[in-house]
Image (tube, rainbow, N blue to C red):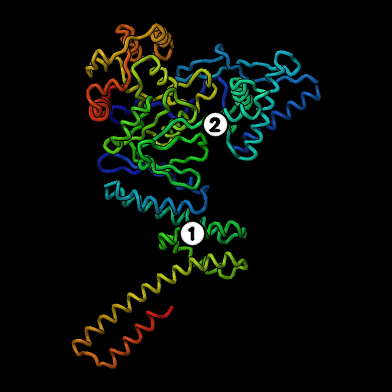
Amino acid sequence: MNEILKGDQKQTQIELPEDSIKIDDLRRKEALERLYDLVDDLIEEIYASGEPVIELPSRSNSNIIWDEKSDLLLLGKQIQKKQFHSLTSVADITRLMRVMEIINELLKKDIHATKREIFYTDVKLFKDQKNSDKSIEDVSTMLYTTRNSTHVVASARGSCVGRLRIRDRNDIIDLEGLGSGGWGISPMLDDIEIIESDAEFILVVEKDAAMMRLAESRFWKQYPCIILTSQGVGNVAVRMFLKRLRNELKLPVFSLVDSDPYGHYIHSVYMRGSKRLSYESPFLATPDIKLLGVLTRDLDKYNVPDDCRIPMTKRDIKRTEELLREKYVKNNPEWEKDLKLALKYKKKAEIQALSSHGFEFLTEKYLPEKLTTGDWI
Amino acid sequence: MRIFHKKDGSIVQLIDKDKMIEWPVELPLIFIEYIRNNKLESYNDKKVEKEISEYLDEILEEVAIPRLIEVLEGEDNEEIIDALKRIEKIANENLDMTRPIKPYLEDLMNNKNNEIKDLADNILGLFRKEERRKELNKKRKVMKEKEDLFLESKISAEDYAEARKEYLTFRDKR
């Protein structure tokens, strides 16, 4: 497998294009300094003009660019202005200031909070979590930093098992010895350090059920690997942890998702980031992740029975067509071909469909064969 | 990461020792012990086992011990107490790992802080216990030889009784 991958791995260091904004991953003190600088500027503007304006990179669709070279979705340089003295933005500005105040508290106390917790600090003001979430992302972009650097973290949703040992503050955790549930990926990644691994690849799985199957068979014993899942689209903690694993261990990364447009979308989010968090893509994306399966072509190759193939809905077809219009898919002929095949068959299948050949088929036949023959996109 | 290549083409990666400089003071020792006790044999490769063992010695000499000494020689009593508590825990599990800091523990016996003195004495007590055990083993061996000689009538009853008395006195002395 390593032979097949040789020369196929992209540079770990990402060079950003000139028309995208640069985001930094900051230590606590640096983030606090940046926050204070921002507030100082605002105070000066209040004294000078009495009508301060906040400027921050726009996160609208028109400002999201796909950089072909790094293969990432990034945030462009368009700037959005928020006026303090405008009736339309007064609620928005108040929420923004409140979130800045909360972030200041988190950083000063060196503690972390989830987006949900922040919403509950002032329900009257935020009214809906969408509003507090938006303000949290606004503050991160205003500070030109990642959300994790502001100590606002994603709730723990992902898990990881396999040939990996980590340090979580003062504890050494062996990810081979935690049962089938594995280690819940901590959103407080600044406390986590990779200390030892004898893995040879990393496998990201979409479904918890597939993760359980792999954990139960202790797949990593025979095929030295680290397995992660986020139960759907990778959240920030999982993507950040995956990126860290990839960068530090320099191992090939594969994804195992359902054979449907949503599965392909999940793979693309790991690969190049999401539009919503495009400003953080350089810290979240793993550009050289390979789509191991389940590919549409696998359905025939592995004789997935017809009754395990589900007809695509109109929505699935629309999503597949949308994916086919994406530049990053057009630039990958094999990926394009597989999606076109899905449109031709108008059928999709879940990873679990492979169980039609027996529960061990995934771990004893499908994955070993795909990995050893280099059958991925 | 520090990479070690196995004969079968696979690899083992261990964190670079430079990164441990910012770790809590006792953690490098815990790491060394963890890898030695839980991982080394599982690599199934004598060459890699040897290389990693040497790397762990490097960590011990260059990071773990100097960091502990730095804390023990410092003036922050709270930090010293914290370090001593952790050293005591490690010493209870593997005394050899803490042997290089024994002279610094002896120095701490002159510290004015009673808690520091007590903790240092507890750890030194483990060394004393170990030395006594070694000495007792040695004396037990000598006693066995004397017994054999006595049974073969190669030494007198007086000599045997003298040796037995010496052994029992040492054994029962606390």
> Which amino acid lies under the numbered mark 2 shown in the image of this protein?
Val
- Disc 2 packing (10 Å; few <14; some 14–19; many ≥20): many
Q: Nearer the viewer, residue A5 or A214?
A: A214
Residue under label 1:
B87
- Residue extending furthest front? A124
Q: Position of residue A226 (x, y in %)?
A: 36, 35
User: For residue A246, which quarter of the picture?
Assistant: top left
x 48%, y 26%: residue:
A235
| Relative to B105, A308 lies left or right | left
Looking at the figure, which quarter contains the C terminus of chain A?
top left
x 64%, y 21%: residue:
A127
Q: Nearer the viewer, mark 1 or mark 2?
A: 2
> Which mark is on residue A369?
none
User: For residue A11, which quarter of the picture?
Assistant: top left
Q: Position of residue B102 (x, y in %)?
A: 48, 66
Q: Chain of mark 1?
A: B
Q: Helix, strand, or loop for circle 1?
A: helix
| Relative to B126, A116 lies left or right | right
> Which mark is on residue A153?
2
Q: Chain of mark 2?
A: A
| Relative to B80, B138 lies left or right | left
Vertical order, A129 against B155 (above or below): above
